[in-house]
Image: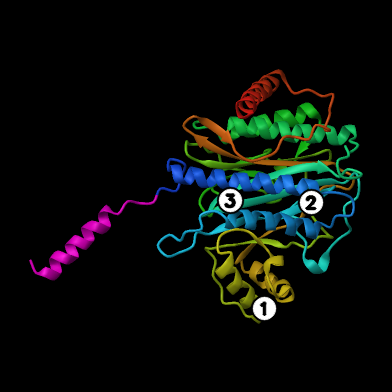
Amino acid sequence: MSDDESTSSAESAAEEKEPEEVTDLSNSDVCTKYQEASKIVNLALQGLIGQCIPGAQVLDLCKFGATIIDTSASKMHTKKVNGVAIEKGVAFPVCVSVNDVICNNSPLGSEELEPLKAGDIVKIDLGCHIDGYISVAAHTLIVPTGPGETPEVDAAIGNVAVAAYNAMLVAAASIKAGAKNTAVTEIVNKVADAYGVNAISSVRMHQMKRFVIDGVKEVALKDPTADELEAGEEKVDECEFDQAEVYAVDVAMSTGEGKPRPSGVHRTTVFKRNVEANYRLKMKNSRYLLSEVDKKFPTLPFTLAHFDDERAAKMGVTECVSHGLLTPYPVLHEQKDAKVAHFKCTVLLLPSGTSRVTGLDMPTYYKTDKKPDEETQKLLTDLAEIAAKKAKKKA
């Protein structure tokens, strides 16, 4: 055997022995990165809650939340790996949706709507990643008359907020290795029925992986009706949860029909690159937008507000969407005067059990006279006791 052949064989053997990178929770470094992203998510939520006062502009709130995420993430993992900086920052654009608007409202600078006023129902939705490991959360609050004041809450919003929050808690506890997604859908519907509200039909919980925010495994909040299936809505395939997986537990509920509609007022600004699609774009603005997306947001959702040339981005997005290059996250709303609540958390399926790492406590001003069924109430009581013991240990 020649020296060249020996060298080649040695290199091939070395390549074969190169360990494959482990990107799930069985890797302790990966688990740490999820935990770090989660702390930033909770910090951003807490900061935004304090800013939701009468007169606050939604655009300013979105910028404020993004600044907290980017600034906090920039302080972590500052050393380069193999000469490359670790990616980190916003994983899902900060969205602030008010009253009957359900989700995905992240306005552009040129399209600011009216400021918040006392009594508005505000849903905050956001995400952070460290090295592609994503944590997300959503929270619903009522705008008070002023800082430090307790807002007035009627029975309708009390019912739907308590229902959505409790459904999130029991769904999170039910997502565990060996369980099926159909069982989670069933328990969410049981909670909605007990409180006399409706789950939002298009909202789904998703598995998350590295740089993947909408994984293959999903959980429906409720099964589509025959009419909805005929109209094109797809039924979620049954799946089983496995250890070392990560899920976004996403619950939105309404006092209305639970059937979201595209907004006629709010422009869709949040999109995600469809990495499997390619097309030779004709418009200059479209090519500019796609080039910027491929450089800055190749896998995770983004908002058009991120681009320096907002006008070019707005003009180019239509062609990109029409050819499947970008997937839109439309601003959805319920029927007028419906009360909507949205809560979301991130769970890690660890060997010790399911761990909820994001999401804040439900505001104490949400009250209801309605009670869940006996089985759900027992689970909620058990979860409350576990949370109390953890809080006592930390104190």
Q: Crowding at label 3, few (<14), some or many (≥20) Cα neighbours within 10 Å? A: some
Marking on residue 285: 1
SS label for mark 3 = loop
**Can you give x and y, in whole percent of width and height, for residue 4 in the image?**
14, 70
Report the span colored magenta: 1-21
Provide the residue designation for mark 2. Answer: 97
Upstream in sequence: badge 2 or badge 3 = 2
Q: Callout 2: helix, strand or loop?
A: strand
Q: Is residue 20 magenta?
A: yes
Image spot of residue 115 (x, y percent) = 88, 56
Check the image and report above or below for 3 versus 228: below
Residue located farthest toward the front when viewing the structure as drawn:
395
78 or 323, which is in the foreground? 78
Q: Amino acid at mark 1?
A: Asn
Q: Is residue 387 above or below residue 57?
A: above
Residue 138 in percent (x, y) is at 70, 45
Instruction: Pinpoint residue 352: horizontal percent, then vertical percent.
Output: 49, 29
The CA distance from mark 1 to mark 3 is: 28 Å
